[in-house]
Amino acid sequence: MKKIISGWALPAALAMAISFVLAPAASAAPPVDERLGVPIVVYGANLSDAEKASVKVSLDVEDEAEVEEITVSGEDLGKYIKNSNPRARMYSSAKITVTDAGKGLVIQIVTPENITQVTSDMYANAMLTAGIEDANVDVAAPKPVTGHSALAGIYKAYEASGGTLDTDRTDVANDELSVATDLTENSGVDEKKVNELLTDLKQQIAEQKPASREDVERIVKEQLDKLQVELSPEDRQLLVDLMDRIRQLDIDFSKWSDKLSKFGQELNDKYGDKIKEKVNDEGFWQSVKDFFNKLIDKISSLFG
């Protein structure tokens, strides 16, 4: 005798199957590290209400209670960057989570289509110059912007978390970011090559401890030749000026060179699954197929 199944049971089973497969995996909220504090979200002061709501979604904090929210304005630029424009329009926003010493920097641009010039590695290089060594940072913007103003927001968020920054270093870090984007945008140098060049130069500055500007010029020439990078005299001068300022700060960059070289792999390991679109995830669709195959077998047994 065949078993009877009611008219609504099969549609209900299918609906349950779809909701089971497509629903996001439930997980408990990560515990707040009471030693380091909650994540800090800093919003560009010129965001509209709708843009701010969009940024909250991008930074994954729209429903998050355990965050501290602050705003960064053009006036804040003056605190970290000399001769900045207090009327600057601020749209780039960021979420920063301070981590334990030795964890390094993990930077994710969560709206890459809207951060048009600054790359993750550029942010990491500039942050190290500014004195921020250990943090997870997500950067977002609701519309296309260069991404430069996010750095001031990161500084403000870092200090709000209890960190301290030297304004001489933050000012040089901003120059570094400008030089990096100028070389990429105007000189035709690949962004990866630019970051490699900056990292190598800072390491050589730390190791060789040049005593004069002439020594810096020599180091710049050596690294340009080594990496086979051709620059105009004007761009070469920008690079020498930047490295001479870094020389005078007396920062030991050598301890960070390994971290920066592994930055790309660390970013992929941390965020690869998060940023992968499910529609392109073969494993996801295989799980859908397996689930329905099992469901069909189960339903067929009801009539067997």
Image: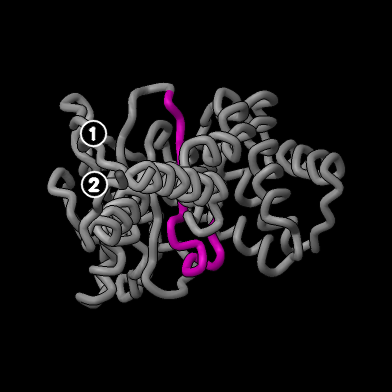
**Left or right placement of residue 34 versus residue 73 in this view:** left
Q: Can the viewer see residue 98?
A: yes
- Where does label 2 land, which residue? 40
Residue 172 numbered mark, or none: none
Q: Quadrant of residue 264?
A: top right
Q: Magenta span covers which residues? A: 103-119
Please say if 134 is above or below 87: above
Q: The residue tagged with tag 1: helix, strand or loop?
A: loop
Q: Residue at x 54, y 34 (%)?
A: 266
Q: Which residue is mark 1?
A: 30
User: How crowded is the residue under tag 2: few (<14 C-alpha within 10 Å), some, or many (20+)?
Assistant: many
Q: Mark 1: which amino acid?
A: Pro
Which secondary structure type mostly characterizes the magenta part of the structure?
A: loop
Q: Nearer the viewer, residue 12 or 220?
A: 12
Q: x%, y% of residue 58?
A: 34, 60
Q: Is residue 177 above or below residue 234?
A: above
Q: Amino acid at mark 2?
A: Ile
Q: Is residue 116 part of the magenta span, yes or no?
A: yes
Asked if 138 appears above or below 111 in the picture, the reply is above
At which x and y percent is residue 82?
Answer: 39, 58
Residue 192: image x %, image y %?
69, 49
In the image, 214: left or right of 82?
right
268 left or right, relative to 303: right
